[in-house]
Amino acid sequence: MKNITIKDVANKAGVSVATVSRVINNSEFVIDDTRTHVLKIVKELRYTPNNLARSLSRKKNESIGMLLPDLFSEFFSEVIRGVDQVVKENKYHLFVSSSHNNKDDIEAALNMMRGRVDGLIIMSPDLDVDILNPLIAKNTPVVILNSKLKNSNHKLINYVSINNFEGAFNIVEHLIKHNHKDIAIIKGEEENFEAIERYNGYINAMKKYNLVVNHKYEFHGNFTEESGYEAGEKYLQLKNKPTAIFATNDSMAIGFMIKIKEAGLDIPNDIAVCGFDDIPISKYFTPKLSTVHVPISEIGLIAANKIFDSLNNETNGSFINTLIDTNIVLRESCGNH
Amino acid sequence: MKNITIKDVANKAGVSVATVSRVINNSEFVIDDTRTHVLKIVKELRYTPNNLARSLSRKKNESIGMLLPDLFSEFFSEVIRGVDQVVKENKYHLFVSSSHNNKDDIEAALNMMRGRVDGLIIMSPDLDVDILNPLIAKNTPVVILNSKLKNSNHKLINYVSINNFEGAFNIVEHLIKHNHKDIAIIKGEEENFEAIERYNGYINAMKKYNLVVNHKYEFHGNFTEESGYEAGEKYLQLKNKPTAIFATNDSMAIGFMIKIKEAGLDIPNDIAVCGFDDIPISKYFTPKLSTVHVPISEIGLIAANKIFDSLNNETNGSFINTLIDTNIVLRESCGNH
DNA sequence: ATTTATTATGTAATCGGTTACATTAAGGAT
DNA sequence: ATCCTTAATGTAACCGATTACATAATAAAT
């Protein structure tokens, strides 16, 4: 079945395509008789304008795109919520796509988005700025979230991130102030930008108080619950056990606690546990997890607002570079609230 | 800054647009010299093809769209995961958009998607089929998930859903077989299709065993934790308390249990609790929640596969109407595992 | 009655690609 | 040397809309 085009409508209605276009776009200067007649034909033929053609000639998509490593986590969902809110307020549409974190996928997704969206919000650990250049050349506004920028001139790109360093620093400092001296850490993946920043926060807090950073107390993880569980196993084999542990995200903290509970140890008395992110499960788990609260949706809000500022030329070519503050929330798992 | 088009490349390279097109599409019949020369210019000019124009003339988008009420819940995330998997396998792209469940938004989102995607997967409680007609006219394959279809001829539309009725029936039957006679229920919203089906499952199980359905034991909810918590408050005010309760989703079950625990009652000894969905928190909560496990991502898998079958004409115009089986998973909250 | 302003509609260029068909050039067969 | 393939490239139509500009028709002003 052939698609109905504006030409078909024009022919059947006995008018020109221009008139049909005017009718469906509610433009002025169409006499009522013509308008109703055309609309009748539109209905008869079940005509609907082709958006591609429309966007092509209007040079506007009225939609912005978002590229995330995955669409499945609490964290990303919250970011999306923030973006979505702003996008809806502006009567735009939001397209979300996922990249699975591998370079080819990112490039493919970006290629697909290009031309289809008027602005882009990208979160992708380890993003190579070269990939972005074509976008920037097309003067499509782009905002990068929580990512490390390879080869990048930060001054030429919009950037919004959680202040991972500070959050980690603060919660580790809290542990230290409550007399913990041997503090272990569960790290994230080596190359993960956020993981690194959180690790740096830990290190700096330890150094500030002249505590020794014992590499035996550094467990490797990958932000999954399983890796936290495994860290728990390794912890249990330690002869001298640290009295506290900072997991660089909540999922790992929970995996860790599951193992510790299985072994019959008490949290926080045998070991105090802190996480990072404040995902919803944190407050339902027993014991309730002390963690770093991240106003996740705010990342999305800020990013989306920046996009629209750019689209509306309210930016005079400047770029933003925002670090969002976190705050620590003390519950049961670290003992001292 | 003007965008670089294929014409600019052709001019600068001293060839025709056709040749440039052939080069960037890796078509045969381009001599190596020409190819490398054109590619050099492409790089110089930082040219990237405009996807809109490309899709318009190719009449193909290589992407499929997904419309969800929200992008924020575990449930939707899982569905997306299923769809995403199939889409990636087919080297297509997935665009996800949310509708917020209101008719205008749905229509706007659908309008936006139309022409931009080659297939559509829609989940939206209370979907009016009239909205879909233009899509169907455009012979864009559409699959509806877990929704009630107004004005619909089910034979003309692809449909995939959880077997809500059977899942609810089974878990309530389980409670009955373990000697519960007074079984309460926390319902979902009145118009929510899934909520209704689950309620019907409950009713039918009760009737099958000749148990009285006491309307005092019916609590109203809206699938949120808060509404479960409120149901807990109402439950506590009852003089004769049922010995078991079926929450039509896990979030409400958890809200309910929080309240019950606060009141110092014991689960499952004072009251057995069952949920529906098997969201991740279910197994971390204390007590671990007995619930109906839903292979959520499978909905997405089936739906996406159907889309591609249609696109590849492997469907000879037939439509699917699939109900996906659930299975009950018995943990601590209902007592008898 | 003629000129002028205004409104309604049509014509055709345009957006940025793809691709059927035409044309040219080069190599092989006779 | 001529003819025939075949490979490489170019020309122009096309995808389906929007819109600047041209034109026709009507009403108002002189």
Image (cartoon, coloured by chain):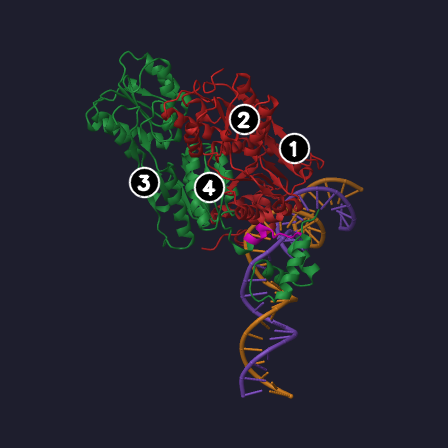
Chain colours: A red, B green, C purple, D orange
Residue ID for mark 1 = A321
Disc 4 + disc 1, Cβ < 8 Å:
no
Question: Looking at the rendering, which quadrant does residue B312 occupy?
Answer: bottom left
Can you give x and y, in whole percent of width and height, for residue B61 in the image? 51, 50
Instruction: Check if residue B296 falls in the magenta segment.
Output: no
- Percent across and percent down for residue B223 are 39, 26
Q: Is residue A288 left or right of residue A114?
A: left
Q: In the image, are marks 4 and 3 on the same chain? A: yes
Q: Nearer the viewer, mark 4 or mark 2?
A: 2
Circle 3: element type = strand
Q: Give the chain letter at badge 3.
A: B
Q: CA distance from mark 4 to mark 3?
A: 20 Å
Give the amino acid type for the residue marked by disc 3 in the picture: Leu
* Contact? badges 4 and 3 (CB < 8 Å): no
Q: Chain of mark 1?
A: A
The residue located at (37%, 25%) in the rendering is: A263
Q: Which one is closest to the eye, mark 2 or mark 3?
A: 2
Discs 2 and 3 share one subunit: no
Q: Which mark is residue B323?
A: 3
Q: Secondary structure at mark 2?
A: loop
Quadrant containing the N terminus of chain A in the rendered view? bottom left
The secondary structure type at the circle numbered 4 is: strand
Is any atom of residue B158 visible in this view?
yes
Q: Label 2 belongs to which residue?
A: A294
